[in-house]
């Protein structure tokens, strides 16, 4: 940090598994990637190349090399996995991961329907090759799961080999764990946390109000995902109680 402030919440140093910030890269250029790393790389734990943008990203290998040189893991969005799977190209997908030296992969079923037993088999199989992050929840706002179902799915996917499970919200933050207004489904989150360890969950929270809500509920070191590149530093100030939204929240909690 540039100077000393007392009573600042403690953040674990990277690499960390808690207090995780997952950033959504929807198409940064090489120059923008370099700028992003310079400004926010030290606060970014992992980068997702959103949905299937890696298919059309120019200079993909060069971009991945930039992130790797900065020590920031990258993975392709779950929609790309689904695009391969629905075309009966699962083995091709595995070869793509190898081709690009990917160490992480996302398995999701937000756009297609996969029997959950089959999804868990895919998680188990792919976890032999890479670290798997699986996503629970649908991108269809009309599909609303009961809390017990979220818990059941998350438990099974962790047992199958998922390192962490993502609670779906899309990049808009208006499905899955949120209502279409962006409001958190508070009862759902509370129920999930009674059964699933919070450090195993990445809550997609693209909107500031959602980030604030989770930080106040779980604490500074909650795992948050789908953060826009330009919002990484602002999020870090929210985590540290240095923005109006959490300014008073941590003052009496930090010793």
Image (tube, rainbow, N blue to C red):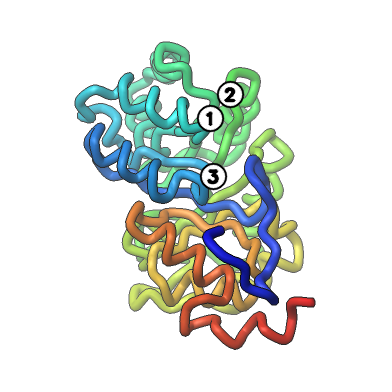
Disc 1 versus disc 3: distance between alpha carbons? 12 Å
Give the vertical position of 128 relative to 245 (above or below).
above
Looking at the image, is mark 1 or mark 3 earlier in the sequence? 3
Q: Are marks 1 and 3 in contact (CB under 8 Å)?
A: no
The residue pinned by badge 2 equals 130
Looking at the image, is mark 2 or mark 1 earlier in the sequence? 1
Where does the image place residue 210, in percent across and percent down from the top left?
46, 72
Q: Are marks 2 and 1 in contact (CB under 8 Å)?
A: yes
Q: How many residues crowd mark 3 within 10 Å: few (<14), some (14–19), many (20+)?
A: many
Mark carried by residue 155: none
Where does the image place residue 215, in percent across and percent down from the top left?
59, 72
Image quarter (top left, top right, bottom left or bottom right) of the C terminus: bottom right
Image quadrant of residue 130? top right
Nearer to us of marks 2 and 3 is: 3
Question: For the point 35% across and 52% down, which residue is it?
Answer: 229
Image quadrant of residue 103? top right
Furthest-right residue in view? Answer: 255
Give the vertical position of 86 relative to 170 (above or below).
above
The residue pinned by badge 3 equals 45
Name the residue nearer the viewer: 162 or 232: 232
Q: Are marks 2 and 3 in contact (CB under 8 Å)?
A: no
Question: For the point 35% across and 29% down, which residue is it?
Answer: 86
Q: How many residues crowd mark 2 within 10 Å: few (<14), some (14–19), many (20+)?
A: some
Label 3 sits on a secondary structure element that is loop
Disc 2 versus disc 1: distance between alpha carbons? 5 Å
Disc 2 versus disc 3: distance between alpha carbons? 17 Å
Where does the image place residue 157, in percent across and percent down from the top left?
65, 42
């Amino acid at each position: 940090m540039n100077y000393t402030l007392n009573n600042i919440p403690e953040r674990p140093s990277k690499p960390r598994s808690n207090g995780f910030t997952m950033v959504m890269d929807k198409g940064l250029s090489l120059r923008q990637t370099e700028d992003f790393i310079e400004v926010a790389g030290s606060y970014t734990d992992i980068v997702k190349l959103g949905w299937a943008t890696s298919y059309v990203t120019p200079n993909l290998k060069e971009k991945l090399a930039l992130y790797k040189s900065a020590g920031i893991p990258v993975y392709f969005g779950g929609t790309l996995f689904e695009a391969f799977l629905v075309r009966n190209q699962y083995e091709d997908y595995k070869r793509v991961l190898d081709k690009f030296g990917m160490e992480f992969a996302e398995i999701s079923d937000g756009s297609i329907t996969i029997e959950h037993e089959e999804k868990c088999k895919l998680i188990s199989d792919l976890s032999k090759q890479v670290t798997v992050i699986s996503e629970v929840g649908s991108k269809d706002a009309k599909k609303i799961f009961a809390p017990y179902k979220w818990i059941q799915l998350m438990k099974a996917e962790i047992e199958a080999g998922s390192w962490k499970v993502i609670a779906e919200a899309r990049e808009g933050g208006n499905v899955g764990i949120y209502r279409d207004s962006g409001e958190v489904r508070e009862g759902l989150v509370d129920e999930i946390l009674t059964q699933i360890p919070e450090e195993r969950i990445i809550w997609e929270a693209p909107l500031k109000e959602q980030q604030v809500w989770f930080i106040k509920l779980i604490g500074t070191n909650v795992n948050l995902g789908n953060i826009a590149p330009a919002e990484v530093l602002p999020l870090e100030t929210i985590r540290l109680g240095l923005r109006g939204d959490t300014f008073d929240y941590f003052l009496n909690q930090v010793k």
